[in-house]
Image: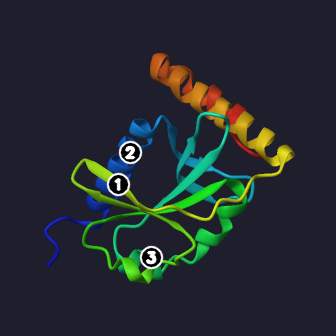
Amino acid sequence: MDPIGFPERTLAVRRAAARLCLRMGWAPLHEVRLANGRRADILALQPGGGFVCIEVKSGLRDYLSDAKWAEYQPFCDQFFFAVDSDFPLNALPPETGLIVCAGLEADIIREPLSVKLAAPRRKALMERFAWMAAARLAALEDPAGAVELAVGLNPD
């Protein structure tokens, strides 16, 4: 029996991956809805305007039951899986980046293939990222106004 449950493992991996982003000078934003309706676990903005998408996997079952990860790749310059140190690494596709997390620490084990986003998609993604980050910050300052902020961010 696993001593740490699925939600706790997911949260721990996501937290460690976000800390790695900060250490790398990237600005991570959690749970970002993309234009295709998918939701990126972490979308990080790199210096220079590059985007990194990080898909958090809590275990092999989580990975095998979710084949949507390829749909995130058109919305980033680099795509990584973030897993914990118990994950069977050879199960992950070799063209993707790999972040391995242990406790609050994480390291990039494998760099992904890089694909440069088209300028119009980059611009739209940058605007979405900025709006979401600003709205989340404003909601922290004014929780009662969060509903109004969310209305402006919902895709039609």
Mark closer to the observer (3, 2): 2
Closer to the camera in the image, 91 or 71:
91
Q: Residue at x 35, y 54 (%)?
A: 107
Q: Which residue is mark 1?
A: 107
- The mark found on residue 63 in the picture is 3
Q: Which residue is mark 2?
A: 20
Q: Position of residue 65 (x, y in %)?
A: 48, 80
Left or right: 53, with 14 as reference point: right
In primary-sequence order, the first of circles 3 and 2 is 2
The amino acid at mark 3 is: Tyr
**Quick one: which residue is furthest to the top in this view?**
141
Q: Position of residue 15 (x, y in %)?
A: 34, 47
Q: Residues within 10 Å of mark 1 (few under 14, many from 20)?
A: some
Left or right: 145, with 58 as reference point: right
85 versus 141 height, above or below: below
Q: Tell me the SS state at disc 3.
A: helix
The amino acid at mark 2 is: Leu
Q: Tell me the SS state at disc 2.
A: helix
Q: Residues within 10 Å of mark 3 (few under 14, many from 20)?
A: some
Closer to the camera in the image, 82 or 65:
82
Quadrant into which the N terminus falls: bottom left
The amino acid at mark 1 is: Asp
